[in-house]
Amino acid sequence: MKQDGPFAVGDRIELGRPFSGEHRTWIKHLLSDQVLTTKYRAVRSQIFNLLHVKDFSGIQQLLDDDELRRDCVQRATLLLGRLFNLDTDTHEIRTRMHEFAGTADAVIEYLSNKVLAPYAAHIEISNEIRIITDPVELLLIIFDDRYHQKVRFEAKRKLVLMNLAGAIDQRERETAIEARFAGFLNFLNAYVWSPDLRIGEHQHAYLLSQHDPEDYRCLDVRVIDREAAQEITLEPLQRLTFVKRRIFRAGNRDIPVYVSMRKKGPAAKVLKLLRKNEKNPAVAVDDELGLMAVLDGRAEVTRFVEHLNKAAVRSGVLMTQEDISDTLTGGSYAATSTGSSSATPMLKFFARLGDTRVEFIIHTNQSYLDYNLRLGVSHDEYEMRRIFESGVAELLFPRDIYHLDMDAVRDQQVQRSRQRFSGAGGGAGSDSDVDTGASRGSGP
């Protein structure tokens, strides 16, 4: 994918002139790095084997001959099916390839709609690439000089993203992630939430918070009901955040908890593989299932964790906690992810229940508001920073093709994100702030 590497997409491509001066310079540069040379030969061999050609002149024949190309597509489809352990018929394999192509497009559309929204027109997918879902067609476009450099780059990019999507799909089938997700939901409903409430029942509440004018950290927060929220006139730097809360019973006490649960989607997993420069989802994606819980205070957080352990035993499973970090009452979080802040207050651990591993992030009301809003700490800012600082933005949208300075774009986007909550970009505590909590999901 890198435009400064041996697979860079140039302005023109000439399969029929292998001994040009430009090609000689390229080969000299390639041979100066043995690792790059080995990688190039491996990828070239894979391309030739997939297309069933001996050299680049064979690729030119495929570009010129429709019948040869159709035969190539038929043969390559079966090979790709076996690559992703799809032991089925051609139609089903093509359906899967269509899904992988949809995931590849979803990665770009996610960035266009969120992290890079003001630059959506700059990075929009070319129409010629958006409609193609067949890997062979995309591969051949890379070698077809009739297509503009941007289109050929996007064909290569889509192929790379489809390959990652295929690896993720294969792992999800092998690990039965959907079944484990359903099983974890059943565990929560059967053993964790109060038996006095029906499945899916919530209590509605609002967090009324006061924020610091400098970094918008939460200075004070209290829980109020819907009726009280409707009567309040917000002061400057005050905010109302809506939360739907479950109930769990600890001893003879009912304790409310706002819960947001997620199963990381394919596009998010592809982005994580890119950020970690990893092709194996088993290595890079260790947080497929996640649960965020928000409680009124530290004492309630402790009771919730104890309740989870006891609920697991009642279900017949011993819950073990791994990779624990706790900064709710001070200390510094050992941030390892690019772009994350070590000042983020939270209790974080992975809970293993049998063959299911779930990432838990637990907040108090105050730390939850900091997690959403505090400048330099908020999750939205972190999500934005990691796309740039990991190099993913430059990888997917190289400057020589999209003409965007990603360092400048990052600074502008972080500033825009901060203005949303500092009062400069619409005013803190406005009516639009009331349902902020609901935007992250009502929880399981």
Image (spheres, helix red, strand yellow):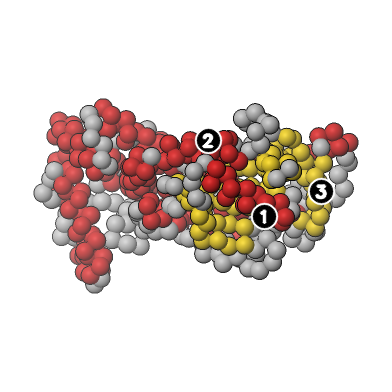
Q: Which residue is mark 2?
A: 186
Return the residue nearer the eye: 69 or 121: 69
| Crowd rating for badge 2 (residues with CA inside 10 Å; few <14, some 14–19, many 20+) | some
Residue 229: mark in rendering: none
User: Which is more N-terminal, label 2 or label 3?
Assistant: 2
Residue kind at label 2, given as amino acid type:
Asn
Question: Which callout, 3 or 2, points to the residue nearer the camera?
Answer: 2
| Residue 297 visible in this rendered orientation of the protein | yes
Q: Residue at x 62, y 57 (%)?
A: 347
Q: Which residue is mark 3?
A: 222
Q: Which residue is mark 1?
A: 302
User: Which is more N-terminal, label 1 or label 2?
Assistant: 2
Residue 212 as seen in the image, left or right of residue 27: right
| Crowd rating for badge 3 (residues with CA inside 10 Å; few <14, some 14–19, many 20+) | few
Q: Residue at x 69, y 45 (%)?
A: 250
Secondary structure of the residue carrying tag 1 is: helix
**Which x, y percent locates residue 234?**
86, 44
Residue kind at label 3, given as amino acid type:
Arg
As displayed, is residue 152 above or below residue 350? above
Marks 3/2: CA–CA distance: 32 Å
